[in-house]
Image (cartoon, helix red, strand yellow):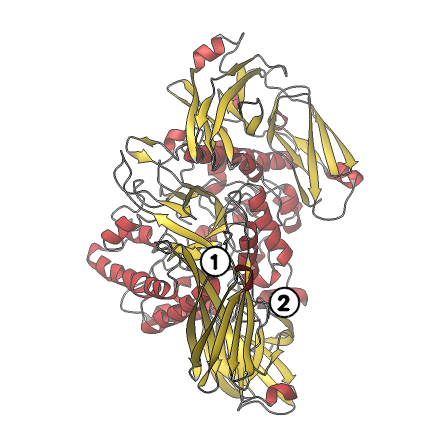
Amino acid sequence: MTRRGSVSVRALGVLLCLCNGLLSGRGRSVAGPRAAQSLDGKWSLSNANGSLSLPAEVPGCVHSALQRQGFIQDPYFRFNDVSYQWIALDNWTYATTFDVSAQVMSKQKVVLSFHGVDTVASIWLNGVAVGNTDNMFRRYDFSVRHLLRDGENVLRVRLLSPVLYAAERREAHSSYRVPPECPPDVQRGVCHVNFIRKEQSSFGWDWGPSFPTVGLWKGVRLEAFDVLQLLQVSSVPLYDSSLSQWRVQVELLVDAVQTTTGRVSLSVPELDSEQTLQTRFVSGKTKNTFVLHINRSSQVKLWWPHTHGDQPVYQLNVRGFQGGLLILNAESKVSFRTVELVQEPIVGSPGLSFYFRVNGKPIFLKGSNWIPAHSFQDQISPAVVRNLLQSAVDANMNTLRVWGGGVYEQDLFYNICDELGIMIWQDFMFACAMYPSDDDFVQTVREEVVQQVRRLKSHPSVIIWSGNNENEAALSSDWFDIPASQRPTYVDDYVTLYVNNIRKIVQEEDQSRPFLVSSPTNGAESQREGWVAADPYDPHYGDTHFYSYLADCWDWRTFPRTRFASEYGFQSWPSFSTLKPVSSEGDWSYDSVFASHRQHHEDGNRQMFLQAALHFHLPNSTDPLKRFTDSLYITQVMQAQCVKTQTEFYRRSRTEVVEGKGHIMGALYWQLNDIWQAPSWSSIEFGGKWKMLHYFAQDFFAAVLPVGFEDADTLFIYAVSDLSHDLNLRAVVTVYSWTRLDPMCTLRSDPLPVPGGSAVALMKQPVAALLAGCGRCSRTTCLLTFHLEDDSGGRRGPVNHHFLCSLKDAEGLQRPNITATVQEAETGLTVTLRSASVAPFVWLDAGDVAGRFSANGFLMVSRNATVAFTAWRPTGAAELSRSLTVTSLADVY
């Protein structure tokens, strides 16, 4: 994701949840007599010259520590992202003193383990250097038994400025440049992030601030043992279709003091499956692979994506014995599913298909793209992660793409996705840049990839690996003005990193799911063309990223009829209640310095208004604050309607091919969440508040959906179904006048069969003929709502709308004078609305009362409507009533 002005195997999975604490952090295992000691908690922190010295929490980062101790304000307040650039330009030292327990000291081997160091550091124990780190995404283990002493031990982690380190690495790479040198000026970022293995967006992005973090962002532990330590269990189910049998490939990452022989017992009791195998753990750190064949007479329940079935789990027991001594004991949870990326010829279309088949069923991927939820990872609480993921599921999403400029997410994230049935498209952390191919850079990347694949491959939610974000497109489309004579060097570097190293490692470590080198890509066709396609945006292949801000987003013809839309979107501003805590009264204007500073996409604020002005009057209140809040509202209206139109186009194109293009099987808009309070492409604001777009997503991602559009002045109504079974449906169209709340007329189509997993045209009607048969209606005086009905007359899916003109041209649209009454019911709070006229884009804002409504941003064509409010903290009717504001389109003119 970036450059948004540009148009742009068979596998299986498993859920691992160790009950007893491994590398994954999901519990604890027993591996013979062993001891562990956490070093998390209070440390001391100081800068290079000692002028700053303060307590600091581990896990944590320097920015968080400085804020907690009062040295800095909220880094997100106003212009502090620029004011606090000095933090990342300094070197910092974390230090702690600790006594080692007698139990730890009694063991033959003691390992000092850092689960996440951000980023470039030297580690010192009792004055002796024990090692160095250079990669935020790796775990580092150091053998320290010989350095520990009775009584007080001193551990220091000396961290270098990531900004200066990256600049020095760039300076040392003198043979040729590795672009881009710096982010665009509008992002107010810092340079050369591609030379350091840390969160790429931390140096600045088009939706976020530049906060190059420094710290110990994950836990620090001492692990002590006499025989061996079980570092990690990963387990991947594989299905043999010729035998109709499952097997579970179990890998144990073990650190053994000396070569040890014994037996390993694997079992899934619920499936009546158990095997005992002789084994030999070689001295040192090794990966040991075992296979458990699942009893063919047992009925295996499959893991399914959200809305397609359940997400069952089984317990896998792993035990190791040396003679009669239990030396290894772990439990994990296993889920069974298959996944394939299907790229094959399509009848009537050149190119190849691009879709996912889960458990043999083609699945349309519906969802969004995930970015880091905060600039400072230690400030992301479990509640924040769960709320965002639950919000995705509540909007009928089944997929999130973990974007390649952020971080490999924490274990909790993937555990919740497993639980909720959210499929994960997992990028490796490379984005929008060329990268060096020096031996030391490639080597640290190799270890990063091995560790992350081993950590994540047990999750059924992860359905695909992708090598990078937009780097094939950057190279192919020459984003960085590379001379033609030098292009082979960059192609060689690209193939070296992503194909010869990352792809090779993934295929060795995980045969259970597909791998793509990039996104967007032409997939198999890119591979045929030497991994860098002439046109990675070719709609006949692979996935596509597409952004176009000035073309009319209500016109579906402007969108590419691609195979899979993995990025697309439009910006909007967050609500006033989200912006208020990080701004001052003088900032509350759309053309303020603050509004410009917060916008990191070139010309973004103007583009939002230009797009909105195509169909809406822009706010013109003489009250400055109202004009500002109305401006925030109109950008959300624009964004919601634009993404709705584009997503509905993709969904109705799933089974048809038009002029050789189509068979679209995925729609992942950019982006789900925000990293701070600012304009962006997100549907959820920083803090969790749903934008209008997210409420719209509840409908346009519904399992059964009516879609309406015009072509050559003819209205088409499609039925889209993601269900596994067939339906018989008719379209019901109701015509309203802008001047009255009673319907002008209703039309019903004949019922037609709608097969499961298809899109079918149910109605085709010239607009002129439709209006002629409906009283005194014209395009400017009337509008349409429509829904689907089954044979019993029951409604299937949401009610949709179709505007026959731009709403700035609508005749009779008036202020509806909506009143709201908040009441407490047995099930929670409700808001009853009463309207005097038809009201488009009715928006309820609860202000500072955290929660969400059952519906919002809707078209109100009735005198009364009631919506529920789910609060995320204790509240009552009185507080909600005081905080509630209700806005409709005509209220901002």
Question: Measured from the top left, where is residue 81 in percent x and y?
Answer: 55, 57
Q: Which amino acid does label 1 sit on?
A: Gly
Question: Measured from the top left, where is residue 92 in percent x and y?
Answer: 55, 74
| Res 504 quadrant in image | bottom left
Question: Measured from the top left, where is residue 722 in percent x and y?
Answer: 47, 37
Front: mark 2 or 1 = 1
The label number, if any, that marks residue 406 in the structure image: 1
| Location of mark 2 (residue) | 66
| Res 22 quadrant in image | bottom right
Which secondary structure, mark 2?
helix
Left-right relation of 503 to 777 = left
Which secondary structure, mark 1?
loop
Q: Which of 481 and 292 is in front in this view?
A: 292
Quadrant containing the C terminus is: top right
Q: Which of 68 and 459 is in front in this view?
A: 459
The label number, if any, that marks residue 394 in the structure image: none
